[in-house]
Amino acid sequence: MHVSVVLFTGDLRLYDHPPLRAALDAADAVVPLFVRDRAVEAAGFAAPNRSAFLADCLRDLDASLRDRGGRLVVRSGDLVEEVCRVVTEADADEVHMSAGHSAFAAHREERLRAALEEAGRRLFVHDAVTVVVPPGAATPASSDHFAVFTPYYRRWTQEHLRPVTGPPRKVPVPEDVKGEALPVRDETTGLSPKLPPGGESAARKQVTAYWRRGLGAYADTHDDLAADATSRLSAPLHFGTLSPTELVQRARKSGGTGAEAFVRQLAWRDFHRQVLAARPRAAHDDYRSKHDRWRTERTAGADIDAWREGRTGYPVVDAAMRQLREEGWMHNRARLLTASFLTKTLYVDWRIGAAHFLHWLVDGDLANNQLNWQWMAGTGTDTRPNRVLNPVTQGKKYDPEGAYVHRWVPELAEVAAPLVHEPWKLPEPDRAALDYPGPVVGLADGLDRFRRARGKQP
């Protein structure tokens, strides 16, 4: 009997899964395998929220496989060693997996390929995580990647998309290959209280609901902080319980400005992956502009703590940081605001903010997180590296009635807009009655420090 192994990584679904489809086409039986890679845990990527969401995803994937006569085999340890063990136990001829785009993923793939070839087996790597495949498929004539989004997007929209496939009807799995017990959510590890459930089943229901209620208005509402009108599909996309290619094709069939704006956001996801694939060091080092005068934990510890805890004295910033802890998620506009405040107003190293986000975000994706932080810090691909987002102006624009602030900063629940965004302007008796701090820094002072640090005159 011919057996293949399909290694699930960031693609925990059955719908539109090229590696699984190829493995089934090539063999009489397939071993669906997920390895809890100890190297991922050692590197700090197995944060509590993502570990809990992952447990949901794996249990849902196992249930879907069992509906089709199969099951998920879970192992723990070094990924290369565990895959090779399963290949030997199943007497498999080949392994199929999706391509990763970080330096860590590329190195792991190289190790796995070499180990399998030494054992006389083959590794097949498929593009299933991005829309335009592979990330370097769309490149300018003069470089190995696009550094500016707009020309990338023009090229991206011209690329041919692979056909989307449905889930398999049957997944025959050899009985003699054993796995460990499926993981479960650990509620004792500091999870966000409102962390949503993970898994392909929940994600597909979420898409159906959003297509009905929000896609058409996405262009007009996605920046409205209080409306919470974004799709919230970032976590399913990060874990691969949804196919980005399927989402793009479905959105294009729907048509309209809302669908077009939604697709554009998926293009940003691919954009960051092609940058990281070409410049893997950008996960930790400045992509473009080098800055060595950042404030750090040693020089700005109190300000950083206030930012993390949502006690900066700037209501829209504090609302966003509290939402992050409560839900393991943050509105995209709020991510820009909080990143600008930390890196530009407080002039703190972007890596400190990126690490905090990676700890809490259930959608904590290396490419999107690190490169968006660099974009906002002025060290990345942004063509206007000195832009500064004013939290008061932004709050009044994107939360004009103060509903977002009222939701997450209950101390200000009785303060009406527009003063809810500037509580320091309240009459002194009213101000003193609030259990809410004053600003950690004046906006003018923060801007002056930023300009001086960047060598610019006020």
Image (cartoon, rainbow, N blue to C red):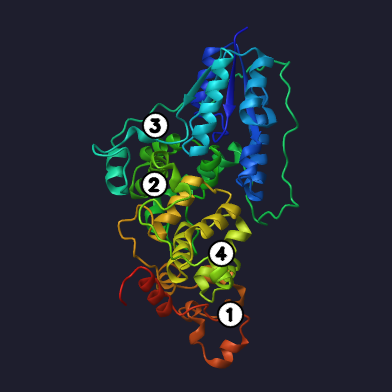
Q: Which mark is residue 268?
A: 2
Question: Which residue type does callout 4 highlight?
Answer: Met
Frontmost residue, 144 versus 176: 144
Q: Which mark is residue 321?
A: 4
User: Residue 346's spot in the image, x, y percent?
Assistant: 47, 70
Query: In the rendered structure, which disc, 2 or 3, sits on the residue that comes first in sequence?
Result: 3
Please say if 384 is above or below 69.
below
Q: Quadrant of residue 250?
A: top left
Query: In the rendered structure, which disc, 1 or 3, sits on the residue that comes first in sequence?
Result: 3
Q: Which residue is found at the position 51% from the left and 82% from the top?
A: 423
Distance from the alpha carbon under mark 3 to that under mark 4: 35 Å
Q: Quadrant of the C terminus?
A: bottom left
SS type, badge 4: helix
Please say if 404 is above or below 383.
below
SS type, badge 1: loop
Circles 1 and 3: CB atoms closer than 8 Å:
no
Q: Is residue 407 visible?
A: no
Frontmost residue, 375 versus 53: 375
Q: Residues within 10 Å of mark 4 (few under 14, many from 20)?
A: many
Question: Mark 1 — residue?
Answer: 437
Q: Which residue is found at the position 66% from the left and 20% from the top?
A: 86
Question: Which residue type does callout 3 highlight?
Answer: Val
Distance from the alpha carbon under mark 1 to that under mark 2: 36 Å
